[in-house]
Amino acid sequence: MNRLPYIRPNIQRLQAGPVNPFRLGSSPSCVEIDGVPVAELARNYGSPLFVFSEKALREKYREAHRAFSRRYPDVQFAWSYKTNYLNAICRVFHQEGSIAEVVSGFEYEKARRNGVDGSKIIFNGPHKERADLERAVNERAMIQVDNIDELLTLASIVRDRTEPVSIALRVHLQTGTHTVWSKFGFNGDDGEVLQIIRRITTLHNLRLQGLHCHVGTFILDPENYRVAARRLVELAIEAEKIGAGQIRYLNLGGGFASHARLHYQYLPPEQTTPSLDRYAEAICETIIGLWPAGRDLPRLYLETGRALVDDAGYLISSVVAVKKRHLPSQMQTAMAAYGKSAAVMPQGNSRHALVLDAGINLLYTTAWYQPKILPARPCLDTPEPTTVFGCLCMNIDVIREDAPLPSLTTGDQVVLHPVGAYNITQSMQFITYRPAVVMIDSERKVHVIRRRENLDYVQELEAIPEHLATRTAVSRPEPHILAVA
Amino acid sequence: MSTPLSDLMLNDRGFVFDPASGETFQLNPTGLRIVRLLQSGLSHDAALTQMVSEFEVDEHTAQRDFSDFLENAVRLGWRIE
Ligand SMILES: Cc1ncc(COP(=O)(O)O)c(C=O)c1O
């Protein structure tokens, strides 16, 4: 037996909850991104500013692809458009060899305009318009059927065609996650999927080619994928037994964790986020081990989103006000319950606070994750718990309840990271304009990939009824005249 | 008050929660292996033999580190039978 490398056994007592992030002593900072100074980026493109590292995108994609292709002969990644569908980002992944995964007609059209052939689009989602399905059928997209209504719509679309159309079924499974995403697809544990497969064998011109399962998102335990892969293989074998033919592909969806940190997550992401190799091992070993001998292995599709893009995205923002915040004790408890704060406050009942020029309308994911917030200049003082408010005129606009930050002043920049997944696609224009987005290429050249919004852009779709069209918008009613006694 | 080893809750990364005190600890992989072996009911001698067979370590070093480790554990409030 091969013996493992030995290190001296050791136990370390961990500090209580809120103390942990402040152990560091000096303050870490983020002075540049891919060799470009943050101050220069803010000066040239404004603040706030989203910044993407093309190098990080490509490196992460290659790492993921390597992890799987080393272990499995036929792997194909499909870029999950909803995770970030800025065209420049999608095109980086397409250049690297990724096809597209879309969940609406809008995303489908976007992928087509990015040069993706219809046959290289995986079409997912619980609501696909009939016209979109017709297009997907004509262009031979890989439709992952979500529900029986969709299946019957498809059956009616393909009835009179000369060739059969291939489809896959989306399945949800009990894999050991907190919640099963049972909103999507058919139940793979109670026989529902097999019933549907039997039904497909009776429908004219539909061929079952694939099975799809997206376990969930930010899955920290690769074992969930082991279970999903095992169940999909079992279902594929049963499908063939009941006459559906051989299953050609298994699609394990997305869900690998990035280096984001959940609100309640105690250990830092460096310790909790599994390597892509561990996910690959769980999935590939399982399929190879269980697939019937002598049969071609199915193609493996992956729709990895956040794990590929999150860590490559930054938000530069500027401090616009410095405050002190008094916190009555019941509020401390309430905030802890709200999930954005630890229950004990090292500074007693008051706390430093900052207002940034960006709000949670740009950082939708702060509802679940706490981005790192780093000063953009080196700071010698020790970090202290600091509440970081956004710029919206709303009380809920809190980006971090207690980020460890050194003392900062108005005009200082900070960098929020990682923010590359879901923030851009889920951000909304509210109160202010959404900022520009730039991408730093491998030669450190900065490219604007989305301009800052302006009033014309925001109002482009509005219309003013004729009777409101004259320019004297404010008319003044007569003031009340009060009788003076 | 000390917590019996069998009450400690561990995960595969060596994170330990002591439900009696609410304290948390981090074990390195070898430390984790020792605690797991003892939790499974092995005697100290049997656990030590197992460590030597699993890891690239000579018996002498393993024995010294093993005792140091258990002493440290007791100081941190764990009860070692
Ligand atoms: C069907 C499907 N595929 C892929 C993804 C991408 O997931 P993630 O960003 O967690 O990798 C999602 C996201 O929820 C999804 O619903």
Image (cartoon, coloured by chain):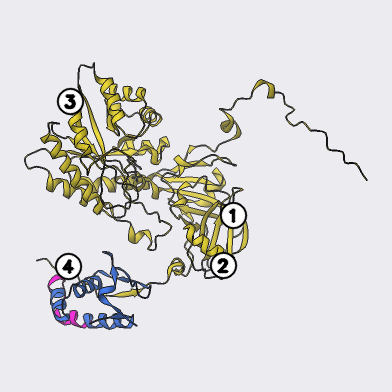
x and y percentages locating residue B49 in the rendered image: 13, 77
Mark 4 vs mark 2, CA separation in Å: 51 Å
- Name the residue tied to disc 3: A202
Mark sitting on residue A329: 2
Mark 2 vs mark 1, CA separation in Å: 23 Å
Question: N-terminal of the two: label 2 or label 1?
Answer: 2
Instruction: Name the residue located 24 percent from the left edge and 54 percent from the top edge.
Output: A223
The chain identifier of the residue carrying mark 3 reads: A
Instruction: Name the residue located 55 percent from the left edge and 36 percent from the top edge.
Output: A453
Q: Residue furthest front?
A: A485
- The answer to whether dots 4 and 3 both sit on one chain is yes
- Name the residue tied to disc 1: A355
Question: N-terminal of the two: label 4 or label 1?
Answer: 4
Mark 4 vs mark 1, CA separation in Å: 51 Å
- Quadrant of the rendering where the C terminus of chain A is positioned: top right
CB atoms of marks 4 and 3 within 8 Å: no
x and y percentages locating residue A180 in the rendered image: 31, 47
Discs 3/2, front = 3
Q: Is residue A262 above or below residue B36?
A: above
Q: A83 or A439, which is in the foreground?
A: A83
Q: Colour of chain A?
A: yellow
- The answer to whether dots 4 and 1 both sit on one chain is yes
